Amino acid sequence: MRTAFVLCCSIALLATVGTASAQDWTKSKWGPNDEIGAANYMTPELVVKAASLVKTGKTYALGIPVDTKTPAYPPRTFKMTVVQPGQAGISGLGPNKATYNDDILDTWVGIGSQLDGLGHLGIEHVYYNGNKLADFADPNGLKKLGIEKVPPMVARGVLLDMAAYYNTDVVKEGTAFNKKEIEEAAKKQGVEIRQGDVVIFHTGWLSLIGKDDKRYSAGEPGLGVEGANYLTGKGVVAVGADTWGLEVLPFETNNVFEVHQILLAKNGTYILENMDTAELAKDRGYEFLFVLGQPRWRGGVQSMINPVAIR
């Protein structure tokens, strides 16, 4: 009887521990009011160290040009209209005949090179730091976790050239990058992943745009579940890739966008998609100063971006 009692208590304790562990992700290590997640890892000291990486002054635009033909996750679309407001039928404004163009965007924000904010993807309508959808989502903008809350990202950038790791120009779709692949690629390049870093994968996938858009959109190589847990355990600020969704597709299991959940909802780690890494990989720029100041749309979920790598 006593043995059975102890066994029952042990099972109950394990069940309690399991439940608590499952709920841990809803509480940020930075407190109940935190809205910036892994950006907390960026310190003035780390920014100074990252700036010391600049040796040549060469800059790399990591954002891609966007137009109506840029493939995007359905149903996202992009449209630009250029206008000359108030200038019809006249030769110009004032005696100096000034003329000008303005542009109007009718677009989804998650197109091209983009930053996924912490209000983008959750688990059963619960988002980073336990924020419930009904409490903070609004058609006019998020009341919490808006993209305007993200501080300027100035950090040490690390490029992992997975195309070189697999000895190919374009890594095959469905190829998952997990702890083994990440550690081996980093070791091969002679770089170490540290707390406060921005880690970006080069796969060659972006080169398919305009050549094979169907293949580009149908799947991709990318970060696996174990790899996501590994990088968040390292304390990185953001993870990116030259792919449209960062994580491996087809997914490793039946779970949908589980890597997004691990990064955004559980750890507050930002996602960078469609990063133009080709030139950086060509120059073997495996370590660099990463700089990003995104448009600060109040209550925004995502943001089109053009980060800069400086070596």
Image (cartoon, rainbow, N blue to C red):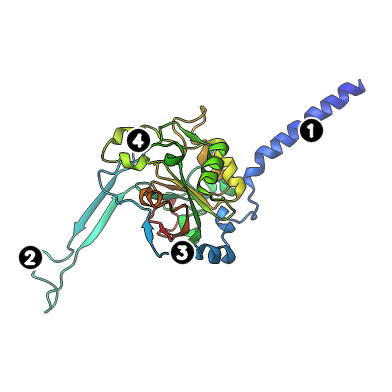
Is 256 placed above or below 311 here? above
The mark nearer the N terminus, 1 or 2, is 1
The C terminus appears in which quarter of the rendering?
Answer: bottom left
Check disc 2 and give the amino acid type.
Answer: Gly
Give the residue pinned by disc 1. 13
Say if mark 3 contacts mark 1, CB within 8 Å.
no
Q: Amino acid at mark 4?
A: Ser
Crowding around mark 1 (Cα neighbors within 10 Å: few <14, some 14 to 19, many 20+) is few
Q: Which residue is mark 3?
A: 54
Residue at the image position 58 percent from the left and 53 percent from the top: 194
Q: Earlier in the sequence, mark 3 or mark 1?
A: 1
Q: Are marks 3 and 4 in contact (CB under 8 Å)?
A: no
Amino acid residing under circle 1: Leu
Question: Outermost residue, right direction?
Answer: 2
- How far is disc 4 from disc 2 in space, using C-alphas? 45 Å
Q: Is residue 279 left or right of residue 299?
A: left
Give the image quarter of residue 82: bottom left
